Amino acid sequence: MAGQVKTPWGYRHFIVFVLWFLYLVNCFDRISVLTFLPYIQKDLNLSPVQLGWLASIFFFVYAIAQVVAGFLTDRIGPKKTMTIAIWVFTLLTGVIGFVRTFWQFMWLRVGLALGEGQHWSAALRMLANWFPREEQSRANGFFISCVTIAAAVVPIIVTQLAAILGGWRPVFFVLAVPGVIGIVLLWKYIVDTPKGLLHSRVKEAEYNLITSSSSSASGPGASERAGSASLKIVLTDVHFYFYCVGVFFMLMLYWGMAAWISTFLVRQHNLNVKTMGFVASIPYFTAFISMNLGGVIADKWSFGKPKLVSMISFLGCIPAMYMIGRVPKGHMLMLILCLIAGGFFIHLMFGPMYSYPARRYPKEVVGRACGISNGFGQLGSFVSPLIAGYLVVTLPDKSYDFGNVFIFLSLLGVLGILAIAFLKEGYILDSEKYRSQAAASCK
C-alpha cells in the first residue's frame, strides 16, 4: 500500500484526458443539432412532433449501438472499437450541412447514432482497465464532464460561427475537423491496458497501483477467478436491473432537458440566437463542477455508498425542473438561477452512476455491462424528447408553453430515487455466491 501512495499522478491521467477530448468531439454533433433545432425547424418547415422525432430517433438507434459496442469492446478491445466510432461520425458530421428534407435528416441521424454509439462503452472499459476501483468515480466523473463542457461551449461556439458564416449549415462542415485530430490522438497515444506501456510510459509503481485494487478484497487468487468471469455474473445479479432502470431515468432527465432547452429559450422566452447560445450553456458550466464533485464525494467521503450521491441528485432535480418551467417571461435572473440549480443536480449523479459497473463487476465483463445498461438507458434518451414534443402547448401567438414538459421532468426525479434506492453496492466477487460462479467458469 505504501507504494500506491507515492504515485498520485501517472500515465493513467493522460489516458483519461485523451478519452475526455475524444468524447468531447463525439458530443459536438448531437449538441450542435439540438442547439440549431429552432432554426432547422424553420428551414425545413417542421412541426413540434417532427422536431421531437428528430431529437429522439438518434437515441433509439444509439441505444441499440451501445449494446453491440459493449460486446464488440470485450471482443476486439476498446481502442479498435473507438476507432470505428470516430471514423464514422467524423465523416457523417460534415454531411449534415447538405440536408434538405425531414427524412434525409432522419436517416442521417440514424447513421450518426450507429457511429457514435460505438464510443461510450469502449471508453468506460478503457477507464476500468486503467484505474483502480478506489479511483473509478473520480475518473468517470472527470471523463463524463466532457459532456457538460460540450453542452456549455458548443451552443456558444456554433451560434457565433453561424452568425459569422451566415447560417447553421456551414457550421457542420467545420465540425468535421476536430474528428481528424481525435483520430490522430487515439492512434498515437492510447493502448487498451497499462501492461502495453509498462516500463516505457507506465512506471512499475503505477502499474501495481492499477492492478491491485484494495476494493476487490476477494482473497488470494481473486484476479484469476475474475479473469474467466462470464456475463452470467452480471445477468444473474438482480441489482444490475435496478441500475439499468436508474440510468434510464437519469438519461430521460438529461436529454429531455438538453433536447429542448434551446427551443424553450427561443419560443417561450423570445431570446435571439446569440443570447440563446449563452443562456443555454449556463446549466452545463455548473455541471462541470457538480460532475467532478459527485465523483470526489463518492470516492472519498461515501466510498462503498455512492448511491447516496445519486439519490440526492435525483431529489434536487424535482424542485429545480418544476421551477424552470414556471419562470415568467422576462425574469432573466430567476431563469438563470433555476437553470444553474437544474444543471447542478442533474449532473451530480453521473460519476457515481457510471462507475457502478466498474466498482461491482470484474473488468473482463465491464464493457458488456456498460453496453447493456447504457443501451437500455439510452431508450430513456429516445422517449423523453419525444414525450416532451407532445407535451409542448402551442399558444395562439405561435409561441410555446413548456410548463407541462418541466412537470414531466420533475416527476422523473421521483422515479429515479425509487430505482436507485434498491441498488446494492460492493464488488460482486466478494459474495460467496458469485465467487463460486466465477470459479465454476474456470473449469
Image: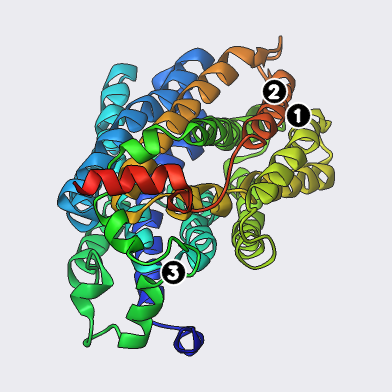
- For the residues marked 3 and 2, what is the alpha-carbon distance in whole angstroms? 48 Å
Q: Is residue 32 left or right of residue 125?
A: right
Of tags 3 and 1, which is closer to the observer? 3
Viewer-proximal residue among 47 and 87: 87
* One can see residue 101 in this view: yes
Q: Determine which residue is flagged by label 1.
A: 325
Q: Which numbered marker is on residue 154?
A: none
Viewer-proximal residue among 260 and 322: 322
Q: Determine which residue is flagged by label 3.
A: 213
Which class describes the residues within 10 Å of circle 1: few (<14), some (14-19), or many (20+)?
A: many
| Residue type at numbered disc 3 | Ser
| Residue type at numbered disc 2 | Phe
Marks 3,1: beta carbons within 8 A: no
Q: Residue 159: horizontal and vertical position, in percent? A: 50, 48
| Residue type at numbered disc 1 | Gly
Earlier in the chain: of badge 1 and badge 2, it is: 1
- For the residues marked 3 and 1, what is the alpha-carbon distance in whole angstroms? 45 Å
Q: Which numbered marker is on residue 402?
A: 2
